[in-house]
Amino acid sequence: MKLMNVDEKIHVLESDTNVWTVIKDIVNTGIQEEAFYVCDVGEIVRKHKEWRMKLPRVQPHYAVKCNDNLTVLEVLAALGTGFDCASKTEINKVLGLGVDASRIIFANPAKPASHIRHAAATGVDLMTFDNETELHKIKSLYPDAKLVLRIRCDAAVAQCQLGMKYGCDAVLEGPHLLEVAHLLGLSVVGVSFHVGSGCGDPPVFRRAIAAARKLFDVGEALGFNFDLLDLGGGFPGNKGTSIDKIADIINSALEEYFPNPDVRIIAEPGRFYVAAAYTLATNVHSKREVFSEEDKSVTHVMYYINDGVYGSFNCLLYDHAHVTPIPLMESSGKLIPSSIWGPTCDGLDQVIENALLPSIDVGEWIVFEDMGAYTVAVAGTFNGFPVPKVHIVADKHIWMLLKDTLPLNTERFITGYTPANLRIGLDISGCGEISDWSMHTALCCK
Ligand code: PLP
């Protein structure tokens, strides 16, 4: 019997269930110990609908780096998005889904030679650059590539700034780079930018689009036929956030600076699509109370959970994320100053420095929402603690939609979420994944 990975199965939810009931059902089995994710595919589908409604002219090219889960990529491929790949491995992953090379932009302005050769071999011809050396490299390795000049235009406020690493100065360097490309006989087809991930400065998109317009004019004067504008990423995705303001600014700037419908407008959203789709459940495996010297009352509680900054919560360090702990068991008890720590022996491995929490017992669960972007894709297994497995769920309506459009093996779908099939794919410490309950019994309960 082939054991199927947890994240290959898609559980179809009955109408009275949701991500939270799924988490409760899993932990209530009493056998789950490892931290785990629940990914709601419906959230990705809803985000795509929102994008198409609010940014109708902009073709999204999902940034694979943000979360490269195979089912996430399959769903996006079925919805018809393009993809932003940063390496040959990401290119292979997307091509492996049957996506045509023309739907990929190789959006890494500094590419290792073998990756450029790979792009040439696989027909991924659209790629970014921001410096002269890259132009010479591309000239020798892939002279027929279609190039996109990446310029720098930083948001005043962003969760992660990128401008210090990529993007040429649009005024001081851009025109010169276009001249060099022209002299080399290369084909430049447009301009791209990335204002910074988690953009908190919507008007930056207008400034960037205006700067790109000027370079379109320079390019056209040199004889290039520019027909692509790439707006990069920066779109927020957490629950409660909105792209309305950014979308309004983009739509009006496009109307003003790029009224010609022949100019193809693309973007590279990452966190917008996946942040809210993932909810992480972590288990409290240890607890330490700190007492007041005066009256011996508890002044602070330290909780140790089985995922930390070397795992999913790497986002606290690399993505400058803020996370909110939600105890799974509701409690009306007294709130106590608390900290939450990851499982490794490193003192750096702290998830929450100080929060008011009710008393939580060892064995109980703490849940974190909005954990889909730059989390599991970056996580490692330092100290031997595993990266949480992903349980994919979809409600019935989404399932109806997906089963007709996804080139998925129907075995991947499990109709309903009954106690029996709930156990399919549970990750049981020491047993690995199981796809059959009797096999679990044979393995673990002898
Ligand atoms: N495009 C490029 C080139 C990036 O480097 C990134 C993120 O680092 C993205 C797109 C995705 O950005 P976001 O997640 O803010 O949408």
Image (cartoon, rainbow, N blue to C red):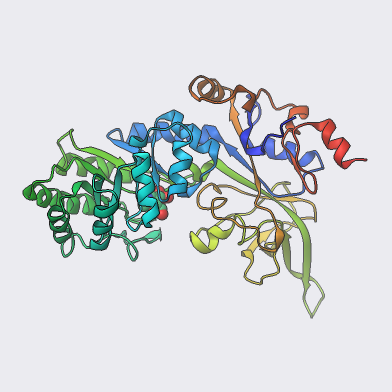
Residue positioned 18% across, 59% down in the render: 177
Direction from residue 141 to residue 317 in the image, left or right: right
| Residue that sits furthest to the left in the current view | 221
Direction from residue 259 to residue 391 in the image, left or right: right
Residue positioned 36% across, 42% down in the render: 121
Depth check: give the residue in front, 257 or 439: 439
In the rendered image, the quadrant that contains the C terminus is top right
Q: Position of residue 301 (x, y in %)?
A: 73, 66
Residue 76, image quadrant: top left
Residue positioned 18% across, 33% down in the render: 261
| Residue that sits furthest to the right in the current view | 446
Is the residue 233 above or below the residue 438 in the image? Answer: below
Depth check: give the residue in front, 128 or 6: 128
Q: Position of residue 404 (x, y in %)?
A: 51, 19
Q: Position of residue 266 (x, y in %)?
A: 30, 40
- Residue 387 appears in the picture as rendered: yes
Residue 31, image quadrant: top right
| Residue that sits furthest to the bottom in the current view | 294
Is the residue 390 above or below the residue 176 in the image? Answer: above
In the rendered image, the quadrant that contains the N terminus is top right
Residue 225, image quadrant: top left
Q: Position of residue 79 (x, y in %)?
A: 43, 29
- Residue 235 appears in the picture as rendered: no
Direction from residue 315 to residue 328 in the image, left or right: right
